[in-house]
Image (cartoon, rainbow, N blue to C red):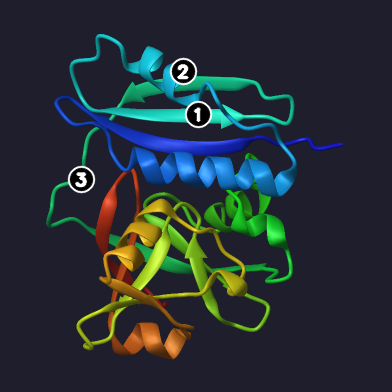
Amino acid sequence: MIDFSLIETLRWQPGEGFIRLRLHLARLSRSARRLGFPQPVDAVAKLQEAVAGAAGPLRVRLTFDAQGRIAVTSAAFAPLAPDTTWTVRLAETRLNSADRLLRVKTTRRGVYEAARAEYATAEADEVILLNERGDVCEGTITSIFLDDGTGMLRTPPISCGLLAGVLRTELICARKARVGRLTLADLDAGTVYIGNSLRGLIRANLARN
C-alpha cells in the first residue's frame, strides 16, 4: 500500500501567475505515471482556485495521492533579496543512491527531516546530503550547483540519488547547467549555489567546521 503523496511546491506572482508551471505539471505527470497513480487532470483548475483574488506573492503546495485526490494550500511568500547568501552545512545522514523514490518528490521526507534536524536553524539555512559513496547529492529542499569556472554550472546526476528539481531542469534545458558528479573537494574549490523553483538560485557559503 502506498502511504505517501506526490508534492509540487510552486511560486505564484501577481501579473506573472505560476512560475515554471509547465515544468511542475510535467514532473507531476511523469511521477504519477512512474508510480502507477492516475493522471492529475484537475491540477491546473485546483491551482487556479487556490490563488483566485490573491494580491501578493504566494507559496502554493499541491499534493496528489494514489487515489487521484488533489489538495492545494497557499501562504504568503516573501522572495529572497538578490544578494542573499545562505549558510549550508553537511549532514551525517546519507542518501541511498539505489532508492528510486528519491527521484520523485513525495511526502516521504524522513531522511531530509533527519538531516535538517542535525543543525539548529541559526546554524544553517540549508543542509547538504551525500550518498553512500560520498557523492554530493542535494539539499533538504534544494538542488546543488557548482560554478567551477567553466562558464556553466555543474549539478549532480539523478543516478546519485536525488530529485529532478524543477529549477535544475530549467537550467539544464537552458544550457546554463550541465550534469556531472560532485565531490566535497569540488565544492571547496568552486562557488556553490543552491536553489529550487520557489526561491530561485541562491549563493551558498559551505561551512565545514
Please indicate whether residue 171 sits to the left or right of residue 112 in the image.
left
Q: Residues within 10 Å of mark 2 (few under 14, many from 20)?
A: some
Image coordinates of residue 70 in percent, x first then y, are 58, 22
Q: Residues within 10 Å of mark 3 (few under 14, many from 20)?
A: few
Q: Nearer the viewer, residue 77 or 70?
A: 70
Examine the rendering and report whether any part of residue 182 can be seen: yes
**Of the residues under marks 2 and 1, which one precedes in the sequence?**
2
| Element class at badge 2 | helix
Residue under numbered circle 2 = 46
* Rendered view: 25 above or below 146: above
Mark 3–mark 2 contact, CB under 8 Å? no
Residue under numbered circle 1 = 62
Examine the rendering and report whether any part of residue 123 can be seen: no
Mark 2–mark 1 contact, CB under 8 Å? yes
Label 3, label 2: how many angstroms apart (C-alpha)? 27 Å
| Element class at badge 1 | strand
Mark drawn on residue 80: 3
Please state which amino acid type lies under the numbered disc 3.
Leu
Please state which amino acid type lies under the numbered disc 1.
Leu
Q: Residue at x 51, y 74 (%)?
A: 157
Q: Residues within 10 Å of mark 1 (few under 14, many from 20)?
A: many
Image coordinates of residue 154 in percent, x first then y, are 36, 78
**Of the residues under marks 1 and 3, which one precedes in the sequence?**
1
